[in-house]
Amino acid sequence: MDSQKTRTEEAEVSPARNTASSSSSSFLGNLLVVPMDGSHWIGIKAIAEEMGRRGHRVTVLIPEISIRLGPGKYYDTVVYPVPYDQAYLDSVMSSHTDILKKETESITERIKTRFSQFQKISNFIHITAEGLLFNDTLIARLDFDAMLTDPFLPTGSLVARKLGEFWYTGIISIPTVNVLRGMLFSMDMTATGCPSPPSYVPRFFTGYTDQMNFKERIVNTLVKCVLLCKMIIKKLQSQINLYINKYSDTMYNRSDFTLDFPRPLMPNIVLVGGINCDVRNPLPEDLESWVSGEHGFVVFTLGTMVSDMPEEITSIFLEVFRQIPQKVIWRYTGQVTSSIPENVKMMKWVPQNDLLARAFITHAGSHGLFEGLCHAVPMVMLPLGGDQHDNAMRFVNKGVGVVLDIFSITTEILLQGLNQVLHDIRYKENVLKLSALHKDRPVDPLDLSVYWTEYVMRHKGTEHLKPAVHELNWIQYLCLDVIALIVTVVLTSCFLTIKCIKLCYRKLSKKRKQD
Amino acid sequence: MDSQKTRTEEAEVSPARNTASSSSSSFLGNLLVVPMDGSHWIGIKAIAEEMGRRGHRVTVLIPEISIRLGPGKYYDTVVYPVPYDQAYLDSVMSSHTDILKKETESITERIKTRFSQFQKISNFIHITAEGLLFNDTLIARLDFDAMLTDPFLPTGSLVARKLGEFWYTGIISIPTVNVLRGMLFSMDMTATGCPSPPSYVPRFFTGYTDQMNFKERIVNTLVKCVLLCKMIIKKLQSQINLYINKYSDTMYNRSDFTLDFPRPLMPNIVLVGGINCDVRNPLPEDLESWVSGEHGFVVFTLGTMVSDMPEEITSIFLEVFRQIPQKVIWRYTGQVTSSIPENVKMMKWVPQNDLLARAFITHAGSHGLFEGLCHAVPMVMLPLGGDQHDNAMRFVNKGVGVVLDIFSITTEILLQGLNQVLHDIRYKENVLKLSALHKDRPVDPLDLSVYWTEYVMRHKGTEHLKPAVHELNWIQYLCLDVIALIVTVVLTSCFLTIKCIKLCYRKLSKKRKQD
C-alpha cells in the first residue's frame, strides 16, 4: 500500500499534461486494465500510463509469462500464474516466422501447417484466458470503477461481467472502455449498431478502397453477407453483441480518416489513430551520429511478431541495402549467416517513433503506419497478415507508399520499390500533406482517450450515447414488418379496386346486354 | 482600412482563449459570413466574434434592414441595400403573433391565414436573398478563404458558389462551413449521405422518441418516404445535395446527444450544441437584488419572434404568476392592459443565459433549451412551431421539463405545469444530471467550431472527410444492382438444376419403360 501511495503522490506532483477539459482533473478513480499481448498492448499501455500519471489508481492484470506486457512507471501490475513457461511461448511465437518460408511445400502441407499454427495460437490464447478467468481468489479481490480492455479477445469483457454489480443477473458489468483496430467480419461495427453500407465501406481482407466498381461491390457485399460465414460467426456475433453492445461504454478505434475511408460512426466510437506517436525522445548519441549523413537513412522493421526470417529472404534485403547509399537501421533478432553491409545496423529494438527516416520499410501494422505518417516518412509496405494488407492498400491509395508481396519478393522488386519511395518526390509530398491532416486535430488522441476513460468513470458509463438500435431485432431495425404491412395494404387496395372495377364493368355490360 | 487594422491588432493583443490546438493559432485567414436572421444568428455570431478575436479577418454580409443582425466588436460588417423598410419587416414579424390567436376562426379561414403568412415570409426571404445575390458590385469585391453560413436558406451557399475559383464550371465553390439545427425532411442528413434508419431515428415533426412502437415506426417510415413529399422536395433535395454535398466542408449541428437521441453521424458533421452558453456575465445590480429572494425566480420568454401576444393569453400568464411566490422575469415587448402583479418584471430583453432561475418557461427553441440545460433549470415548454415540438418532446422524455399546448392553455393547466417543475424534485435532479453530461466534453463547442472553421481554411476544405457515397446513385448506394444480379444468378441456377433433374428423371423413366 505504501508504494501505491508514493506512486499516486508522485503522479499528482508531476506537471500535468494539458487535460482536454478542466473538469476531468478533479475526479480520481480506480481503473482495471486487461490488455492483449503483442502490438495490441501499445495503445492500452499509453492510456494506462497517462491515467496513472494523472493520479488515478490503475491496475494492469498480466500473465506471468508474456511477450511484451510488463510494469510501467505510473500503474501497478497484478501478475496471475499461467500453466506454461517461456519455452512454450517462444514455440508459439516462432510459428509466425514459418509464414515467411518460401512456398516449396505442397498446398496440402501448407494448409496443414497453417492449421496447426492456428491451433497452437488458439490453444495459447485459451489457456492464458483461463489462467485469469478461473483465478477466483484474484477476481474476488478486484474492485474498480471501470475496465479498459481490448475486445479482440473477450477475456477483459468477461472479467468486467464477473465484476458487475448484479453479476448473477448476467446483464450488468462494470463500465467498459474498449480499444481496438477492428474485428473479423466487422463484428465490432455490427455490435455497436453502426451502419456500414457495402457500397462504399470496404470490408477487411478485400483490399478495396471506397471507390469500388460493380465487380468489387459484388465481392464486398458477398463478404458482408456470405451465408457460411454468417453461420460460423452467428454465435460469436451474438456473444460479441452482448459484450460490446450492452457492456461497452466507449469504443476507441485505433484509426482515423487519414488511414481509413470516411464512413458513418456511432456516438460512442472515438477515433484515436496515432495514439502511439505522441512522445518523441532524443536518440541515443551513438545512433544519432551513425544515422546522420548526406543520404539519410531507412528504417526497417516487420514488427515484434516476426523475430526471425528464412535465410533466403534476409539475403534479398541485405543485397538491396548493399546497393543503396542510405544507412539502414534494421530491427531484427534472428540469425544472419551472410555478411552484413557496412551501411546496415541490426538492432534488437528500434526507437522507430524517434527516427525521422528517408523511408520506412514496414509490415503495415496500424501502429507502425501511424508512426511513419506522424513523421511524414514514405513507406515500403510488406503486409504479412491480419489488417496489414488493407492498411497498406489504403496508404497506396493515398499515394504515400508502395506495397510489395514479401512472399514472392526478389532483389529487383525490392530495390525498385525502395528507390521509388526514396526518389519519387510525389511520395514525400503526399505523406507531408496527409501527415499535416493527421496531426491537425482538436484534441491529441492520447488526451482524448484519457478524457473519455475518465468520462466513463465519472458518469458510470455512457448510457445516453447508446443508440436504441440495440433494443431492436433485425426485422424491426430494417423496418421489414412496416414494409410488409405497407405492401400488403397497397396490394389489397389495388386488388379490391380491380375487383370493384371488374364488378362494375360486368354489371354495366350485363345492363347493356339487357338494354 | 484603418479601423480594420486597429481591430485586428486589438484582437491580437487581447489574451487568447485556450485554443483547442496550438497549430490553430498560427494561421490567419479571411472568413466571409452570410448569416440568417433571427435566432439562427446566435451561433454564427458567436463563431464570427471568436474568429475575429483570434485575429482572422471576418466580414459579415448583412441587409440594411434586419431583425437581429448587426455589428460586433471583432468582425466587420458589409451592409447591402434591400428594397423594403422597417415597417415592412415589422409587418412580416407581426404575423408570428397571429399564430397565438385563440382559434375562433373556421378551419378554412385558419388555412387561409397560415397560407398568407407563409407567402409573406417567403416573399420577404426571397427579396432579401435577391438583394445580396444580384448585387454584382458587392460580390465582385469579395475575396475570401472560406464561407461560414446557415444552409437553412441557400443564399450563403449560392454566394460561395459565385466566389468559387471555377465559377463558370458550376462545380467548385470556396470552402464552406454550414451551421444548422436541422432541415425539413432531414434533407441535411440526406445531403451528407448520413444513414438515418427510420426504426430508431425519429423524424422531425413526429415528436417521437428513439423507442417507437409498431404504429409509430409506420408513421416514421411513411414520413421518411411519403411519395408526395418526395416529389415536392425532389428538386429542392437535389439542389441541397449539390450545395451541402459538394460544397460543404464541415457541417455544425447545433445539437448534441443530451438533446437529440444517439444516431450515426458522418465524419464532417460536428456537434456544437450549447455554443451560445459559453459566456456568463454578472447581472445588472438592480436586477440581481430584485431576483434575490427565498423563493427564487422564474424566467419566461417565447423567443425573439413573438414580440406580442393576444390579451387572452397574456392574462392567463399574469393570473398564474399572481398565484406563485416566485419572482418572474418576462421578456415581452407587447402591450398589456391588465394590471401587472408585483412579482412580475417585464423586460424588452432578458439576459437569459445569465439567470440561474428556479424554472424556465420557454418556447423550446434549441438555443433557449441549451441555455436552460447549461444552468440546470427545469423547464415548462410551450412549443410554437418549427423544431420546437420535437425539442420539447425530447426533454420531456429525459424528464427535465413538461410540455404544454399554448394554443389551448388555461390558468389551471399552466399553474399545474409550473408547480410541477417548481416542486417535484425529480425535474431538478434530472436536469442536473443531464446538464453535467452536456457540459462534460473534451472541447468547448465554441472552441470546436472555431477549430474546424480554421481547419477548413488551413486545408482549403475537408476533402478527405467526404464519404464516397456522394459518387453513387441510389441504386448503387443500396447495392440494388448487386442484389438483383445475385438473385438472378441464384434463381437461374435453381431453375437450371430443376430442369436438369426433370430431364434426368424423364430419361430414366423412359429407359425403365423401354426395359
Image (cartoon, coloured by chain):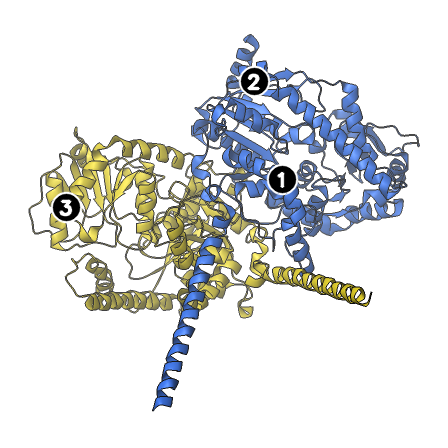
Chain colours: A yellow, B blue
Left or right of residue A268: residue B382: right
Kindly report the distance in space between the C-alpha atoms of the residues bearing marks 3 and 1.
57 Å
Say which of marks 1 and 2 sits in front: 2
Q: Position of residue B302 (x, y in %)?
A: 77, 35
Q: Which residue is label 2 attached to?
A: B139
Say which of marks 3 and 2 sits in front: 2
Q: Is disc 1 placed on a helix, strand or loop? A: loop
Residue A16 shows in this picture: no
Neighbour tally class for label 2: few under 14, some 14-19, many 20 plus, Cα within 10 Å? some
Whether residue A107 is situated above or below residue B283 in the rendered picture: below
Q: Which residue is label 3 attached to?
A: A317
Q: Is disc 2 placed on a helix, strand or loop? A: helix
Q: Is disc 3 placed on a helix, strand or loop? A: helix
In the picture as drawn, the residue positioned furthest to the right comes out as B338
Residue A34 is drawn in which quadrant? bottom left
- Which one is in front, B74 or A452? B74
Say which of marks 3 and 1 sits in front: 1
Q: Position of residue A161 (x, y in %)?
A: 49, 64
